[in-house]
């Protein structure tokens, strides 16, 4: 059962065509690893639902986000501290369609466990925006670094094995194999078949908080194929990329009877569809498996920890949006308790479960964010909101299951 109260974070970067693209490709292709033969096991932390690793640069330890949907990146603050040179700039687009020119550099050495990755191309990224700032990371361990090894992520025990020899890993007999094509940055891209409709460009994205998100085009194709098509939808700011929130968009939630990817298949589950987002398979999906990413053979191996599937959508019908030191309604689901209470997009939340949130410092917002990720808002939500005319509305939102049989 899926609980929805926060917008999805999708840290994906696409490189747009430009005269500097060839240099960008070279930067993302370069690098090596020492020692040549290695196997190390490192713990990781769950922070706001993401995977956070300890890395060392020049013998100093930093927290980095693990993200197969983006290349290696260092924060602007860390780049300044390390006096990293700018060797290129590239126009890029994040997962919500926001575009920005980003500087690129070369990191001479970054060590994870006892493995050193040398002379690796990296972006210089602004990681201080609201939301991203809550992660409190100094960079991103991205796909152009990850592709130098095989990575096995154990979500149950919260550790990662990094190895030069995939054969040294234990792979359970009930595992399923999915082939992938690496993008320019090394990001794994897979094909997916959903109810007989094929989607060829789906990012296997460790930097996406959610489950399976696909395009509205696929939603329309599925809708045309079935006379009985059950879905619910919401509208608003339903995602954050590296450069912040995108434009408002509709998201459709559909219970689909089958999903297939290579040797993997799943029974009935809820899938999200929207126009202004990239196709991604995120951490909520991956967390049900022991995940092995093998760039040598271009294979993803999924070993189930538990049965995968989402039998319904469980929601109060709204999400939060933090901006300018205030908390707002970020999206509204049609027919939900939030909609029936008369709440609207951009209404300001001034009280949340008895707590005054009329003004919020960044750290206060981060606490609310973490509480939502930890499931502390699964019960009823007591809200006081102020609409755009200044009128206050006091209401209690009751989480409701949708798409149940």
Image (spheres, rainbow, N blue to C red):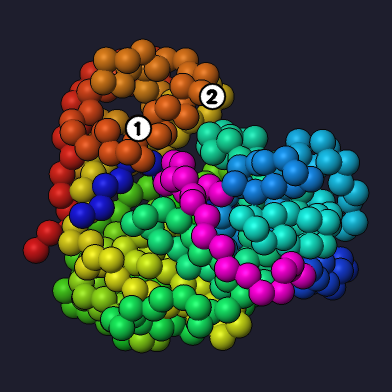
Image quadrant where residue 380 sits: top left
Q: CA distance from mark 2 to mark 1?
A: 14 Å
Decide if residue 51 is on the left or right side of residue 27: left
Q: Which residue is mark 1?
A: 371
66 in the magenta segment: no
Decide if residue 17 is on the left or right side of residue 112: right
The disc, 2 or 1, on the residue closer to the chain's N-terminal end is 2
Q: Please, which residue is most extreme toward the left here? A: 405
SS category of the residue bearing label 1: helix
Rate crowding at label 2 as few (under 14), some (14 to 19) or many (20 or more) other CA atoms within 10 Å. some
50 in the magenta segment: yes
Q: Which segment is the magenta one?
A: 32-53
Q: Main secondary structure of the magenta part?
A: strand
Residue shown at 12%/59% (left/top)? 404
Work out whether residue 326 or residue 285 is closer to the camera in this orientation and state it: 285
Q: Which residue is mark 2?
A: 362
Residue shown at 22%/23% (left/top)? 382
Nearest to viewer (mark 2 / mark 1): 1
Q: Which mark is residue 32?
A: none
Image quadrant where residue 172 sits: bottom left
Question: Eyeballing the image, is 259 above or below 364?
Answer: below
Question: Eyeballing the image, is 264 above or below 236?
Answer: below
């Amino acid at each position: 059962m899926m609980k929805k109260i926060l917008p999805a974070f999708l840290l994906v970067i696409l490189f747009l065509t430009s005269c500097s693209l060839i240099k960008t490709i070279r930067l993302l292709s370069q690098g090596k690893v020492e020692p040549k033969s290695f196997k190390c096991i490192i713990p990781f932390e769950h922070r706001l639902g993401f995977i956070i690793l300890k890395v060392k640069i020049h013998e100093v330890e930093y927290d980095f986000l693990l993200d197969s949907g983006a290349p290696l990146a260092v924060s602007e603050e860390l780049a300044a501290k390390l006096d990293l040179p700018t060797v290129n700039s590239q126009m890029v687009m994040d997962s919500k369609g926001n575009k920005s020119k980003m500087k690129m550099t070369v990191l001479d050495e970054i060590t994870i466990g006892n493995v050193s990755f040398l002379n690796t191309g990296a972006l210089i990224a602004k990681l201080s925006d609201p939301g991203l700032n809550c992660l409190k990371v100094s960079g991103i361990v991205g796909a152009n670094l990850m592709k130098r090894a095989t990575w096995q992520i154990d979500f149950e025990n919260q550790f990662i094995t990094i190895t030069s020899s995939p054969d040294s890993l234990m792979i359970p007999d009930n595992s399923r194999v999915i082939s992938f094509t690496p993008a320019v940055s090394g990001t794994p891209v897979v094909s997916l078949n959903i109810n007989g409709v094929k989607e060829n460009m789906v990012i296997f994205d460790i930097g996406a908080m959610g489950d399976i998100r696909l395009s509205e085009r696929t939603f329309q194709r599925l809708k045309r194929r079935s006379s009985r098509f059950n879905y619910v939808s919401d509208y608003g700011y339903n995602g954050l990329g590296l450069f912040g929130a995108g434009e408002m968009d509709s998201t459709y939630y559909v219970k689909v009877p089958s999903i297939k990817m290579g040797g993997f298949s799943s029974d009935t589950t809820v899938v999200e569809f929207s126009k202004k987002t990239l196709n991604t398979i995120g951490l909520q999906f991956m967390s049900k498996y022991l995940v092995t990413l093998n760039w040598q053979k271009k294979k993803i191996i999924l070993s189930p920890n538990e049965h995968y599937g989402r039998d319904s959508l469980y929601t109060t019908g709204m999400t939060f949006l933090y901006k300018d030191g205030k908390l707002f309604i970020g999206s509204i689901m049609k027919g939900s308790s939030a909609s029936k209470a008369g709440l609207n997009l951009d209404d300001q939340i001034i009280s949340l479960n008895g707590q005054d949130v009329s003004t919020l410092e960044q750290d206060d917002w981060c606490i609310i964010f973490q509480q939502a990720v930890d499931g502390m808002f699964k019960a009823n939500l007591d809200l006081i909101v102020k609409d755009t005319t200044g009128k206050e509305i006091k209401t209690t939102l009751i989480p409701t299951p949708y798409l149940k049989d």
